Amino acid sequence: MTTARPDLLSLAARFAKLPDPQRKTFLTTLDAAGIDFRLLPIPPRAERAASVPASFAQTRLWLHARMIDEPAAYHITERLRLDGALDANALRLSCDALIARHEALRTTFAEGADGVQQSVHAPTRCPWHAVDLSTVPAAERETRASAIAAADEAAPFDLAHGPLMRAILVRLDATMHWLSITTHHIVSDGWSADIALAELASFYRSYARNEAVSLPPLPIQYADYALWQRRWLDAGERDRQLEFWRARLDPTRDVLMLPGAAPRPAQRGARAALHLFKLDTPLAQRVKAFANAHRATPFGVLLATLDALLARASGETHIQVGVPSANRERGETAGLIGFFVNTLTLATRIDANKSFAALVNATQQGLIDAQSHQDVPFEQVVEALGVVRSASHHPLFQVMAAYGARRPLPSLADVRMTELPSGMPFAKFDLTLSFEDRDDGSIDAGFIYALDLFEADAVERLARRFVELLSNALDAPDALVGDLQWLPHAERAQLDAWNDNVPQEAEAFKPVHEHIADHARARPDARGVADTDRSLTRGEVDARAMRLAQRLVAAGVSAEMRVGVALGRSVNLLVGLIAALKSGGAFVPLDPSHPRERLSQILDDAQIVHIVTERASLAALPMSEHARVWLIDDESLYDDDATSNVPLPAVAPQQAAYAIYTSGSTGKPKGVIVDHGSFALHCAAIAKRYGAGEKDVFLLFQSVNFDGAHEGWFSQYMSGAAVAVTADTLWPPALTCKLMTREGVTMTYVPPGCATQLAEWALAHGAPPTLRSLTVGGEATSREAFALMRRAFPNARIVNGYGPTETVITPMLWMFNPGDDPAKLADSAYLPIGTLVGARTAHVLDARLNPLPVGVTGELYLGGEGVGVARGYLDRPALTAERFVPDPFGVPGARLYRTGDLVRRRADGVFDFIGRVDHQVKLRGLRIELGEIEAQLAAHDDVREAVAVVNGKGAQAALVAYVELTDEARVRAARADAAELDAHLRHTLPDYMVPAHIVVLDALPRNANSKVDRAALPEPKRRERAYEAPKAGTEAALAAIWREVLDVERIGRADHFFELGGHSLAAVRVATRVAERLARDVPVRTLFEAPILSQYAQRVTRARVAEGASDLAMPAVVADAQGVLPLSAAQLGLWFLWRAQPRSAAYNIPVSLRLRGPLAIDALREAFAQAAARHPALRTRFVEHDGALPGQRTDTTCEVELPLIDLTNDAQRVARATALTDEDALTPFDLLDAKPLWRARLLRLADDDHVLSLIVHHIVSDGHSIDLWLEDIRTTYVTLKAGASRVRVITQAWPVLPASAPPSRLAFWRDALDGAPSDLLPAPASGRASDPQWSANRIAFEFDDALVRRARSMSLDAHATLPMLLHAALNVAFYRVTGALDQPVGVLASTRELTGDAARHALGLFINAVVVRTRLTRNDSPATILNTVRDAALAAYAHADTPFADVVAALSAPRAGLGNPLFQVMFNYLRPAGAANRDWAGLALDEFNDVRHRVVFELELDIVEHPDGRVTGAFSYANELVDAAFVEALSNDYLAAVQQFVEAPHDALGEAHALFACTPHGDAATQPLLDTAARAKAQRAAQALERVWRDLFDGQPLSHDDDLFEAGATSFDVVRFVDAAQRAGFAIEIADVFATPNFAGLARHVAREALVPAGAQHAPAINQ
């Protein structure tokens, strides 16, 4: 028994025709039958000409192309050198053939209601440009060629106008050319580029050698694949594959922070650079051998290396990298040009404790799994995962990796092709790493990097690290990933050199207090210390400290005993501290202003028995009964007694010098013990770094509980400087500056917050004149605070001090001297923390204590053999062991301190402070640098200082920022509030870093050390967002746009676009509507930067006016308060013609249909009524305003009449019906009447035989609208006949108006029509009528079917269409009859597609006249003329959105009362929809009375392609203006010309018989001369008309002979002028102005005419 094989193609075709809901069931059935859907072929789509949805990949790229700031980022460029004898024409024909073969290359894109649509166009020539440089000096040719090619490669494409491929050929000499081919990525990809070159070579070979093209036909086209993919995924495959991606990817992963990256901007641009490097042949061979041994691909090995590198460089363990997927699993797609490539995200967890070999295995498996699920588009993966969108970074991954092989290039017959570098790099991602196999076995590699983020040296270092890591990984594949060496030797050597700062000869140890004593002995009378009330000399300070120390020693104080020093801010403070050091004990600072509980904890923890204090502080101290108190203000302490001879002990370097208590995580303070040796070495190093000397005065500003205060005064004082003490740590700036001036302070050390206050005061009142060094420290200092200090203290050095207490005060300093380059700051959010002070070491380490290189953020570890670190925490060995770790880089026993601070080392060795490890937070998976937020807030002019925190936990966690305003801002009425600061941040920060709440405070809370007290920050007030209606104007207009795009009922000022469901495509739609309706060019990315309505409205208001917006070109269909809308450009033209000829029926569109069969008249009337309810054009009427353009109003209701005239008893009923339909066609409409601009009536010939007479004015309809209208009526009629209910629904309030191009596109028309002839056609023997009625004669004909088939075939061979061939035949016939070689012919072009989806099914006037100019020579053949017409027509259609009236005005075309400007002959090709052939519920429809009564052009050729395939034609002409014999001769020659096109296409035209001649437009009949009286009357009339004009147009002066149109008058101006002149009593008509457009000529006309001529029917130029 045999089983029949299923017909796979039939199954595929059946699947394509099924409705969407049934496709999923179909797939299930297939699966149950054991048939894999992937085996089914892709069926070609049925309707080849219809628009179809763009593929998912194309939609994604279309969005990106709209958002990116570099259009060329999505160009695919091929630059080739061609060596050999090139046939340039064959090459051009090959490019044409390539476009003809692949629909993708002639596809255009437009946004529709259902997304992005792609439209395939007829074959067209490849845009081609040839440049000959052979005459340029040889040395300059390649440079010139490169510049020409680069400019062409960078020129943007318009995705709405194809083709999206172009070529430029540059001739360098007879045997060398450069060919540059540029294609938009939306229709091509890398694979496609290879196909294109191969087929180009094949076509060239055939054309150059006159051989047949050997390429097989393509099984499908790209649009077929796009439809198939969409249907397949929609039927369930998408959901299946998305389950894989949901399980594999983490949507909340970090934005990857890479080494060397600058702060991420709110909108990352596309500017990029390329860094090339190479994996040499030995290394590349090792990669391939390792891959083979581990059953992996070389790309898998390289990708694993990249993952490991990124993990080591970023500190992340979860790395997501993008990789391209060719997505050509189907056999049908292998030879197609198109955009198939998809982007896959590979997620890899980097376990530092696993081997590199294991990482390669995991990476390779990830590649395989991802490629098994490559069909679902990347954008849909992003949406399904709910990834946080941001304009600052690419979703899911920021690094892309790709691998390829160098392709062999085909030859063009005997011409050799060589690839040249082409195109510019663009940053679609932060980083893209590409690999390419070379023939010599090596691998080329290159990083494309975003210039907004990376400098060249950072990427160069990254490349070297990649090679180092790869080499070491291949050497030891079983080594742990976390321990593989990735730093090149040069970088490791540099790190070692920075830490090699131990002095050659160590100085003998001398404690700090002995340095102080030396100065006292040498200069006892020198200034010592001063406070606000008194001062002591050095001798006095030392003497008093010695006496107190002796008493302490006598009382039992010895080494390692802690002595409490609890003193206020006075000279006694220094005395007490020095005394404690001299006694051999360790001082413990106690601030009497601190809470008693904290003081009690310190006293108890340090086991303090001896306390040096003063009477004023006694009450604040929690004394124990065992405490021994020494009152420093008791003068008896300094008297001589038995203790005066007590010797002071020598101290050892390892002996404790002091204990400073810092806040602990448990809430209890912890003591840090610092030895004398470290303290002395540090103070000496600080003094040396500062250059302090005996002439300096140091201001002690900070709290004694801050070790920086002791560094400041001890290091300076031991160097000979004097010390001044402020009365309080929070002293007002005025008092502080006063003291600095009084004491001559040269140096001070203050917290950043206090420094900004001092700076603000100094800017207003002047800086202390002696200040030369200002140090800030204790917390990070913003760049903005630094800038303020520089302005306030221009002559002072600004120093940033850094250091935890545990590392002996300030181990690092950064100094900025007056005159230094501000570039020293680089781009860090905070001031740099500088370089090491003294003999220390600094290491940036990862979690495994491996060194991190320049540019990589890690935790800072400090140590060294010199100054070293503190001893540890008092009596806390476990905590000491945790924070003080063995130094793996030092001598045995050396230790490093884990600072908990994140830093990054620059290339010059300077450290940047990034933030605390515990301040670097993650919110919804995104890593947030709080310091960056604080710095950007501080950059606002009104902000003095800012703090950012994460408030709440889990799902309730939110970023909160607190700001303290400047003094100046606080006193202003208008100052920064939360909304303004939010908008400020959105200009510079990614949206995920903008706080949810910004709290403005009078002052930030501070602790006793003047640091911001984060624990005391108030809770932000959370309140539900109340609805606030948009403000009138821009906000209201934008709210309406958002409602449409997002399909929501209400939009408020505070609503967030993306929270309401907005996405990328929706953002594009908003930008499009803003441009259309508000005439503002707003980039798509603006909505990402300002997603709140009120903020977006501000940005829209500030945006530049859209190109082409003007007073007369309204940007949007916006009704005024009376509900009146503007007219389109085409409607304005017809309105003007009606004003000129109100009794003319020339623009009536008559439709007469014979209806045979049983007619339900009520159902037909109701069908007309429902159509009127659905289509605003059928309810539209026109209104005029004084001094303003006319408008249109759409009625909400429309009473439809369908009168019936019974002719059944009339013996001549058919003739009578013909006469009635003629009467209907010739009855004009009044455009200002209250009735609709259409009418219909039925004529009954018999019970089952009727004639429908339907007339509509052209101003609300066109030919396609008639088809749509009749189809609407038919559908409703059939439904009503079947028994449906009669419900009329107004479905659309406003008519759809066609799109118009900006004036910039007029440049094309100026070039195309420059110098075009403006001739009149041969006139009748009686002459041209002066007041024609535009009555028509008609010569009809029909083409033979065989002739049509041959003509259609020839058209396709020439990459043209049948209408183009029949147009070209008209040019040939016209040449033969008249001899004219330059022929501008009018063609009607549809503007529906340019207007968008809304116009697709709308009734209205969606046509525009365009001019196709054909220039012939006698040597031309029909074939060459067809090519000429094709190119000219395609170019004209590409600019069909420029209103014809604008073209006429731009060209200053002759405006005569008779005829039309720019052309007299119209070619019109019609494809009626064939409504008569469709089901009319039993009715049979035929045309009735199709006689043409009126024409609107002097001569028209109408070609009709009927639904049954017949092609007919007719010449219609204005018999009062055009010679009938001429038209008859033209008609005969036309049919002969069509025959020649198919039988002798290559025969030259030769000489024309030219029996008739055209006459120039200006040859008008001369007017009779006026007599003297009439001339005087004319002179007075000219003066009066000039006054009418001047009064009407605000005093615009014109002389009597000035041409009104050359002076800028529009048709609308003429109408206003004629109305005003008639009111003033002058008998002029609109046609008169066109005949003589100046006051003198009009006055002569007035002198001849006594009255306004009745019934004047002049036809002025169309669409003026």
Image (cartoon, rainbow, N blue to C red):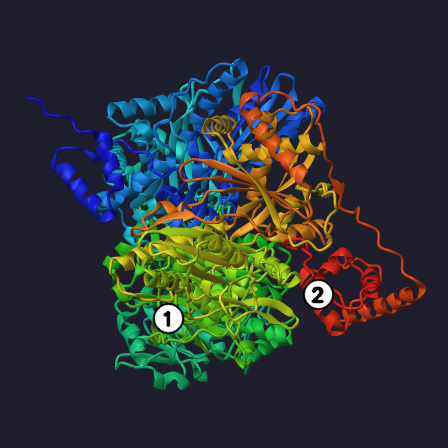
Q: Residue at image x 53%, y 60%? A: 799
The residue at the far left in this view is 1
Give 862 or 567, whichever is nearer the viewer.
862
Residue 773 appears in the picture as rendered: no
Relative image position of residue 657 (x, y in whole percent): 38, 63
* Circle nearer the viewer, 2 or 1: 2
Q: Residue at image x 73%, y 41%? A: 1315
Relative image position of residue 1208 (x, y in whole percent): 39, 58
1420 left or right of 1154 in image: right
Amino acid marked by disc 1: Arg
Give 1349 or 239, whichever is nearer the viewer.
1349
Amino acid marked by disc 2: Ala
Residue 1245 appears in the picture as rendered: yes
Q: Residue at image x 37%, y 56%? A: 1273
Element at label 1: loop
* C-alpha separation, residue under disc 2 versus residue under disc 1: 57 Å
Q: Is residue 724 above or below residue 897?
A: below
Q: Which residue has dot 2 on it?
A: 1654
* The quarter of the displayed image where residue 1211 is located: bottom left
Q: Which residue has dot 1 on it?
A: 1050
Element at label 2: loop
Q: Is residue 916 above or below residue 116?
A: below
Q: Residues within 10 Å of mark 2 (few under 14, many from 20)?
A: few
* The quarter of the displayed image where residue 759 is located: bottom right
Relative image position of residue 798 (x, y in whole percent): 56, 61
